[in-house]
Image (cartoon, rainbow, N blue to C red):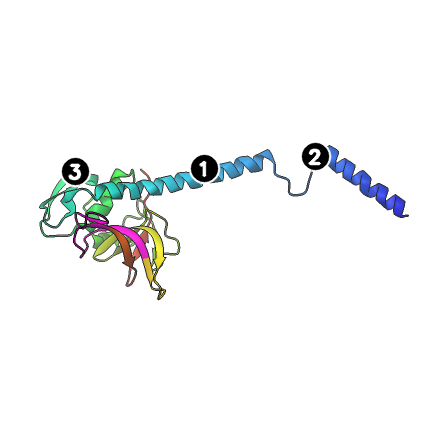
Amino acid sequence: MRTEFLKTVFLLLVLTLISGCFPASRTEDDETSEKDNVKEEVNKESESSAIINTAKIEQENPMYSPEADSTYLYWLDNKLALLKGYTKCNIFALNVLHKSGYKTPKTNALCRDLVDTSRFKDILPVVGIRDISDAKTGDLIIWKHHVIIFEEISRSIKQDLYVIAWWAGTRYKDNGENVKNNVIYGKYRLKGDFVVRRPVKK
């Protein structure tokens, strides 16, 4: 009886080896699908890093300083805006998106326009309201009077919610490092009513 059982097991093993079928084996299709998924993730990552890289380059532009009276709206065919004494967070964010190859409004959208969830749904879809759990690098976080470009979440020791981000209009003086031309790369505490929007490629 035992010999019969062993023969059956042996025969099944031989048949399995000959047919090349193994449980949960990886097929060529599986590998292709996995490669496609990896490629898609790399593309998404490189697209969002394009926004961050552009923000870093754009930080060097003195027109974002409150002292500069001439500011250009790249996304509106370089329209000139005279805004001496004002911070330009919305202009910085939209200029960065435009230069990075993303869709932007056909108007000079102020923060109060961008935070209005009934507007710009096709070019800047809302992915969160007072919630950044779905935020990705390059998303905009917008309040009624401010907008920042999200890079990543960063909690404080007290577990307060902060993000690492880029924005124009800071109270810190230029230091030639993370603050230049009133544009800062740093930690921003998240509080109040805000909207998270995801840029869409042109």
Q: Earlier in the sequence, mark 2 or mark 1?
A: 2
Disc 2 residue type (three-letter): Gly
On screen, residue 9 versus residue 50, left or right, reads: right
Is the Cβ of the residue at disc 2 closer than 8 Å to that at disc 3? no
Please give the name of the residue rendered at 25% of the width and 43% of the height, measured from the top-left corner. Answer: 56
Q: Residue furthest right?
A: 1
Identify the residue position indicated by label 1 in the image. 39
- Magenta-colored span: 163-184
Give me the C-alpha separation between circle 2 and circle 1.
Answer: 29 Å
Look at the image and tell me whether residue 59 can be seen.
Answer: yes
Crowd class of label 2 (few under 14; some 14 to 19; many from 20; radius 10 Å)? few
Please give the name of the residue rendered at 32% of the width and 56% of the height, measured from the top-left corner. Answer: 163
Disc 3 residue type (three-letter): Asn
Front residue of 71/182: it is 182
Crowd class of label 1 (few under 14; some 14 to 19; many from 20; radius 10 Å)? few
Q: Quadrant of the C terminus?
A: top left
On screen, residue 41 versus residue 51, left or right, reads: right
Q: Quadrant of residue 46?
A: top left
Identify the residue position indicated by label 3 in the image. 78
Identify the residue position indicated by label 2 in the image. 20
